[in-house]
Image (cartoon, rainbow, N blue to C red):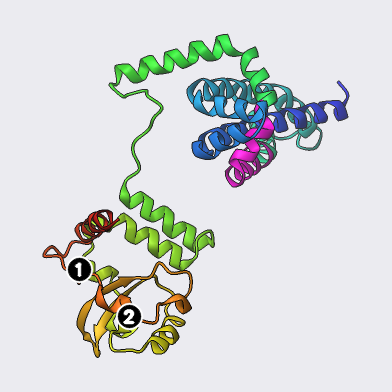
Amino acid sequence: MNDLITALIGLFLVLFAGFFVAAEYAIVSSRMSKLESNAKRGGPIDQLALRLAKDQSASVAAIQVWITLLGIGIGALLEEWITGKLETFLSGLPAFVLSIISLLIITFPLVILGELVPKYLALQFPETGLRLMAGPLRVLTVIIKPISWLLQKAGELVLKLLRIPTDEGGPAISREELHFFIKSGEASGGLNEDHADFVTKTLRLDELDAEDAMLHRLDIKWLDINLTRDETIEKLQDIPNSRIPVCRGILMILSGSHTFTILSPTSIAPNSSWKKSPAPPFTSPNPSLSTVLSRLCVRQNLKS
């Protein structure tokens, strides 16, 4: 066989193996929620990508068969060819040494082009990659389905003998893992610091006290019940909240709170009727933040 043709066939097999490596990593790395969203908004190819990801065991089994066959084919084709070329320059070396050198030469492009680069690309763009590869991958998995099905069942049998569950649901994500994902997203720039802090505190809601979510009294925006109408309107210009503490003279003397449902501060009636009916101050004997929030929700529902 012509040397150029042999080299091109070898390169094609390496890239073909890389295709399956990328497909495998794309399947196991894709977020199911994003695939489902794409399938609802997209076309048949997005739905096919979702089916491949849902039937992960069968897809990965077929991919592994292809990778194994291609690895055998690459070794059978290129090892003898490269060894023959090396004999021209290194004729004094034993045959097994030449074979080892040829295997090392084959391994380099196979690892780079057939393993690492496809893996990195698939991990970087899992959903997009799976969408691009879904069509040909489906055809190739169907071609080899009998063999992959047999191997898949054999693997499941071994796991069953070892008393290892074979369901694809996987273990539930723990709170610590979610916290790690959030920190990773913050470090990579996917989440800003405020969002990451908010989500982290939300995960710890049952551990937090009300004090952890409260503003310092110096940062609280409040209304003095003794203010005139014009002073109240001016004060409201600087308060972005709709529910505002109402105090008498100083913040420590709390008269209650008032919810402003008006469209603008200037629509306050001249008689300042809001002063006559502020909601009573809210108190909770239990400092747990989740308890306080629940009581606030109940109070709000009763008021509405």
Residue 122, magenta (yes or no): yes
Q: What's the magenta region?
A: 111-134
Q: Give me the C-alpha separation between circle 2 and circle 1.
A: 16 Å
Q: Nearer the viewer, residue 18 or 52?
A: 52
Q: Residue at x 26, y 58 (%)?
A: 303
Residue receiving disc 2: 220
Instruction: Give amino acid for label 2.
Output: Ile
Q: Residue at x 39, y 58 (%)?
A: 199
In the rendered structure, are the residues bearing label 2 and label 1 in contact, judged by CB atoms less than 8 Å apart? no
Q: Residue furthest left?
A: 285
Instruction: Give amino acid for label 1.
Output: Phe
Disc assigned to residue 282: 1
Q: Residue at x 44, y 86 (%)?
A: 234
Q: Is residue 98 visible?
A: no
Quarter of the image for residue 41 reads top right
**Predominant secondary structure in magenta?**
helix
Q: Nearer the viewer, residue 96 or 164?
A: 164
Q: Nearer the viewer, residue 71 or 150?
A: 150
